[in-house]
Amino acid sequence: MKSGFEFWDYVIFIAYAILILGVGLWVSRDKKGHQKNAEDYFLASKSLPWWAIGASLIAANISAEQFIGMSGSGFASGLAIASYEWMAAITLIIVGKYFLPIFIEKGLYTIPEFVEKRYSTNLKTILAVFWIALYVFVNLTTVLYLGALALETIIGIPLIYGVLGLALFAAAYSIYGGLSAVAWTDVIQVIFLVLGGLATTYLALNTLSDGQGFIAGLNKVYDAVPERFEMILDESNKEYKNLPGIAVLVGGMWVANLYYWGFNQYIIQRTLAAKSLKEAQKGILMAAFLKMLIPLIVVIPGIAAYVMVNDPEIMARLGMAGQQNLPSLEQADKAYPWLLQFLPTGLKGVAFAALAAAIVSSLASMLNSTSTIFTMDIYKQYINKKASDKATVNTGRLSSLIALIIACIMAPLLGNLDQAFQFIQEYTGVVSPGILAVFLLGLFWKKTTNKGAIVGALVSVPIAMYFKVAPKGWSSSSFFVDVPFMDQMGYTLLLTMVVIAIYSWLQHKGADDAKAIDIKRELFKTTPLFNIGSFAVILLLTVLYAMFW
C-alpha cells in the first residue's frame, strides 16, 4: 500500500538527505596537513561533547527494529514491549556509573580490546570474530531489510532497490568520515527522529479520535483495549513467552540490556570518544531521559493501529472498510508504515525522514563499529602489526564497504519476519548471557581466570539451548524444558557465572588472577548532576510502572 507521497513530501525528504550528506562530508574533511589516524577515524579524535554523545547513543539505538519492529510488537501485544526502552534508561545509569569509568581509564578503542587486557588475545579474537559476524549477518542485514520493507510499503520502492538505496546513503558519509561523521550527523538525525515520530503519534491518535486531539485519542485507545496497557503480563496472555511477567523487571531483561548498552561496540564506542569521563556520563544521562520518551514514538502508534483496524466504525469513517493488506497479528510489522498514510502532505515527508534517519544512523554506526573491531582487533593484531595511520584508516574504510556488500546480499533473503524486534532479541539472547557473564566477572571478581572465561563462554550456548529447545516428542515434564527466552537468558547467565567461578577457583585455588582489575572506590564517584538525574530517572520509572502495572 502506497501512502500518497506528494511534491512537498519529496522536497522535504530530499532536503533532509542533502543536509545529512552535506554535514557528514563537511565534518569528514581532512584538516590541512593532517593525515587521519586511528583515533581520528574510530574515536572522533576523542572530542565529542555530552550532547553529541547522548544524541548519537539514541540515533544508533533507534532504528527500523524499533520504528517498524517495536511498533509491530505494540500492535501484537501492547505497551508491555516498552519495558525494553524504560528498563534501558536505568541500565544506562548503571553503565555510566560502573562500567564506563573502567573502559575510559583503560583507553579502549574496542570492547574486544578489554577482553585482551583482562583475559587473553585468544579470547579477544574469538569474541571479535563473533561480533563481526553478528553485526554483519544479524544487525546490518535486519536493519537493511526492515528499512527497505518500510520503503516498499510507504512509497512502493521494490525491496532490492530500497536495500541498495539505504546502503548507499549510509555509506556516502560514514565510510569516508568514520565516527566523527556518524556522531555529528546523529545530532541532526535525532531531531528528525523525535519530531517526526511525535508527529506520527499525534496525528494517528488525532485521526482515531476524529479530530479531538492527542489526549482524546489516547483515552479512546485505552478505553478500547485497556489490557494492552498492562506492563506485567500474566501466563494467560498469548505474548507471555516473549514478555514473561515479572522477569522483565527482575530477570532476563537485565541480561539483554546490560549486554546491549554495556558491551556492544556500536553503542559504547561513542562514549569512548568523549572529551572526558564526565562528558560521557552526562551524555549517557541525556540518553536515559530520551529513552523514557521513545515508547510514545514507537509503541503507542502500534496500539493505535490495532484499535483502528479492529473497529469497523472507525474504518468506515475513514473510508477504509474492506481495505486489503491491513496490518494483522500475522503481519504486525506493517502497522507503522500503514499509519503514515494519515499524515498530511509535508508531514509525511518529515515522518519518512524520521524513519530514514533512524535506519541510516544505525547502519552508519554498525558499519563504523564493524570496521573498528576488524581493523584494531584482527588486522593490526594478525595481518599488519606495524600498519601506518593511512593503512589503518583505509583498512577501516574497506572493511566497512565489504560488510555493507555482504549485508546487501543477505537482506533480501530474510523474507517476511513477523515481529522482527522479538526475533532479534530472542536469537541474540542465546549468546549474550555467556558474554555478559565473562565481562561482569572479569570486571568485578579478581579471581576470574582466562580459562574459566573461555569454558564459561563455550558452555553458555548449550545451557541456553537446553532452556530454549525441547526435542520433539519430549513432554514438559521430561528432562528438557522450554521456557520463555527472557527467563532462559536469566538462568543461562547465573549458571554460566557459576561455571566460570568454579573453574577459576579450582584453577587458582582461590588466588587472584594476574590480570585482575584493581578497582578503587574513587573511580566510581559521580557528579551531583549525574546523581540527581539518575534519581529522577528511577523516580519516573517507578511512577510509570505503578500506573501501568
Image: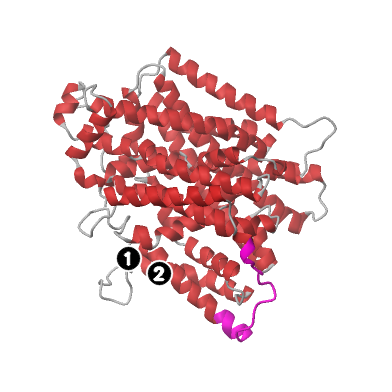
Which residue, given by chain and number where applicable, does mark 1 sit on? 483
Looking at the image, tell me whether mark 1 or mark 2 is earlier in sequence order.
Answer: 1
- Asked whether 156 falls inside the magenta stretch, the response is no
| Mark 2, other Cα within 10 Å: few <14 / some 14–19 / many ≥20 | some
Q: Please indicate whether residue 244 sits to the left or right of residue 267 in the image.
A: left
List the residue tagged with mark 2: 491
**Which residue shows up at 50% across the image and 53% down it?**
93
The residue segment tinted magenta is 503-522
Farthest residue, direction left: 313
Q: Position of residue 152 (x, y in %)?
A: 41, 29
Residue at (85, 32) in percent of width and height = 33
Does 440 sit above or below residue 176?
below
What count of labels does the image hold? 2
The front one of 323 and 544 is 544
Q: Nearer the viewer, residue 381 or 99?
A: 99
Specify few, some or many for label 1: CA neighbours under 10 Å numbering under 14, 14-19, or 20 or more. some
Q: Callout 1, which amino acid?
A: Val
Q: Quadrant of residue 25?
A: top right
Label 1 vs label 2: CA separation? 10 Å
Question: Where is 306 relative to 288, above or below?
Answer: above
Q: Tell me, yes or no, whether the two marked residues, 1 and 2, touch with CB atoms within 8 Å.
A: yes
Check the image and report above or below for 202 versus 255.
above
Q: Position of residue 408 (x, y in %)?
A: 54, 39
Give the secondary structure at mark 1: loop
